[in-house]
Amino acid sequence: MMFAWLPAIITAQSTPFTSLFDRYSGDTGFETTEILPNNTSFEWEKEMDSSHVKDMMKGIDKISILKYKSESDKDLREKLWKNMQKAASDEVYTELVNVSAEDMLVRIYMIKGLEGITREVALAMNDKDVIMLVIMTGNMDFSSMFSHENMKGLCEMGEYFMQHKGSCDHQEE
């Protein structure tokens, strides 16, 4: 009986990256955003059949974004990047992507849960203007996320955005 609760307990635990997000949230110079996809409606949903995309997004509980954009405190920028790398070195993470370009470093990490379900995907980015951490948490099944139907839905959504970019639905008074 105790094992039935194990996935819920594992999912609810904080991770090194979520702890880092919580640590810097509210500090001077940091911008934070948390998006709850299941509680959010999108403009494109009114214009197209988005059932496949909505099903795909059900596995995402939260997207947390931490951004530091300040050229005045290079020591804090370096400390933040080192803390991100320290968090990523935890054995729970698997590094998926490592890009080092002229003025930019990008790393993508993930935590696998039970039965191939992904608990967390984190993107750490450091470029000359900004340091950003994007954390997507939930019980994400990437095998179903990348199904033919979902990819078709994402393409339709992309086409919608390309047709409507820069448009505004409300009128100025």
Image (spheres, rainbow, N blue to C red):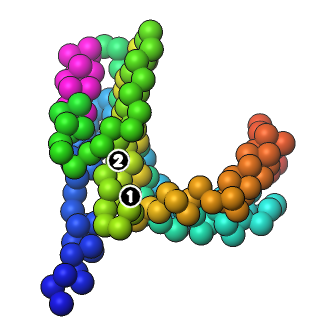
- Asked if residue 114 is positioned above or below residue 131 in the image, the reply reads below
Few, some or many C-alpha atoms within 10 Å of disc 2 (few <14, some 14-19, many ≥20)? many
Percent x, y of residue 169: 79, 51
Percent x, y of residue 50: 71, 64
Quarter that holds the N terminus:
bottom left
Q: Residue furthest top?
A: 102
Disc marking residue 90: none
Q: Report which residue position mark 2 lands on.
A: 110
Which image quadrant for residue 99? top left
In magenta stretch: residue 19:
no
Percent x, y of residue 75: 20, 16
- Magenta-drawn segment: 73-84
Using the rendered image of the protein, determine whether residue 63 is visible from the camera's viewpoint: yes
Q: Report which residue position mark 1 lands on.
A: 118
Q: Residue at x 22, y 49 (%)?
A: 92
Percent x, y of residue 27: 26, 37
Q: Is residue 68 left or right of residue 74?
A: right
Q: Residue at x 27, y 73 (%)?
A: 7
- Residue type at tag 1: Thr
Q: Given contact means CB atoms under 8 Å apart, are the residues at marks 2 and 1 in contact?
A: yes
The local secondary structure at tag 1 comes to strand
Which image quadrant for residue 122? top left
Which image quadrant for residue 5? bottom left
- C-alpha gap between disc 2 and disc 1: 7 Å
Q: Main secondary structure of the magenta part?
A: helix
Q: Residue at x 39, y 38 (%)?
A: 96
Give the mark nearest the N terminus, 2 or 1: 2
- Residue type at tag 2: Met
Q: Is residue 142 left or right of residue 163?
A: left
Using the rendered image of the protein, determine whether residue 31 is visible from the camera's viewpoint: no
- Asked if residue 99 is positioned above or below residue 1 in the image, the reply reads above
